[in-house]
Amino acid sequence: MEEQPQTRRVGILGYGELGQFLVSQLMSLGPSLGLSLAFVWTRRPEALRALPPDLRLADLRQLPSTGVALVVEVAHPCVVQEHGEDILGHADLMLGSPTALADGDTERRLRAAAARGGHTLYVPRGALWGCEDIARMDSAGTLQALTVTMTKAPGSFRAQGWLSPRLAAAVASGTRTVLYRGPLRPLCPLVPNNVNTMAAAAVAAPRLGFDGVTACLVADPSVPDCHIVTVDVTAVPEGGRALTVSSTRRNPAEPGHVTGSATRHSFWSSVLACTGHGGCVKLC
């Protein structure tokens, strides 16, 4: 009798727009792809009432008993900052909030936990176009500069700290406003839900990293129904001239939403790519 292939059990942390989409995909398409939904956990347990009780994980300390192989975080950076090391001791982890890695201590702890447990810390590319090319250039030492510009309607930003009043002023003015331009690292804790694509760029280009990647955040009321991501790459000059590449991605989005519609499918593709690559950090 032929042995049936074992399904890969996937747990979801977070049940917002992305979490709900991934849960739906796992329940409808997962079985035919060798995937099954192990559990869903959220910081707001009341949001899970529509799910069967056996799929609701009340306490992350129960995770080892679920038989989960891959945990997908689409909640908030604080979740992996608090629980990421423990998760990597039992399963692979797809980090939907790579802005968490802007904190140097968190990045060191998660990398060490992945190596120690033999599990993979996956970073999804999200809306980052040209991810593999950026990674190859960085690895070869030919990447000189990388700038990621994110343009959204003011209502799509979730700003904190000193950036919050600047965003409020932009809303009041009703005009296109550059909210921030500078190194990526200090921007991440100010808009952790908005700049995960930029964080993916820092992971793709570790020689530049969070301090070397330039981030530009633009609030523009003239684009209420899309998110625009522009990636500008400059190579190390050769013979006095340098390769430059610029790409612009317009992602349809509902007004006021943090995540564009195409990004949901990008995340699902990333989940399918998380098949276990050992104790390392890997873009997916």
Image (cartoon, helix red, strand yellow):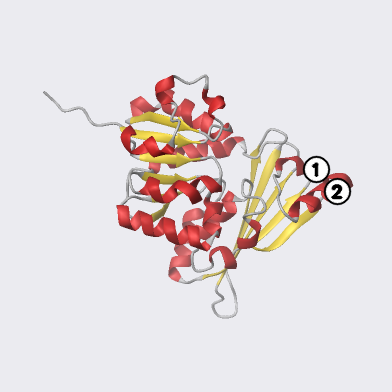
Q: Which residue shows up at 36% across the image and 45% down it?
A: 92
At 51% from the left and 49% from the top, the residue drawn is 125
From the viewer's perspective, is 216 left or right of 282? right
Q: Is residue 259 left or right of residue 54?
A: right
Amino acid type of disc 1? Pro
Q: Earlier in the sequence, mark 2 or mark 1?
A: 2
Query: How many discs appear?
Result: 2
Estimate how packed mark 2 is, as few (under 14), some (14 to 19) or many (20 or more) residues with alpha carbons within 10 Å: some
The residue drawn where x is 43% and y is 58% is 109
Point out the residue furthest to the bottom here. Answer: 239
Q: Can residue 160 be seen here?
A: yes
Q: Report if the CB atoms under discs 2 and 1 are less than 8 Å apart.
A: yes
Image x and y of residue 192, in percent: 62, 49
Report the residue marked by disc 2: 175
Q: CA distance from mark 2 to mark 1?
A: 7 Å
Where residue 278 appears, as percent x and y from the top left, is 30, 52
Residue type for callout 2: Thr
From what the image shows, is residue 277 above or below residue 63?
below
- Does residue 214 show up? no
Q: Position of residue 4 (x, y in %)?
A: 20, 27
Residue placed farthest to the right in the image? 173
| Kind of element beneath mark 2 | loop
Residue found at x 69% / y 33%: 254
Q: 189 left or right of 109?
A: right
**Image quadrant containing the N terminus:** top left
Question: Which residue matches tag 1?
Answer: 221
Q: Quadrant of residue 260?
A: top right
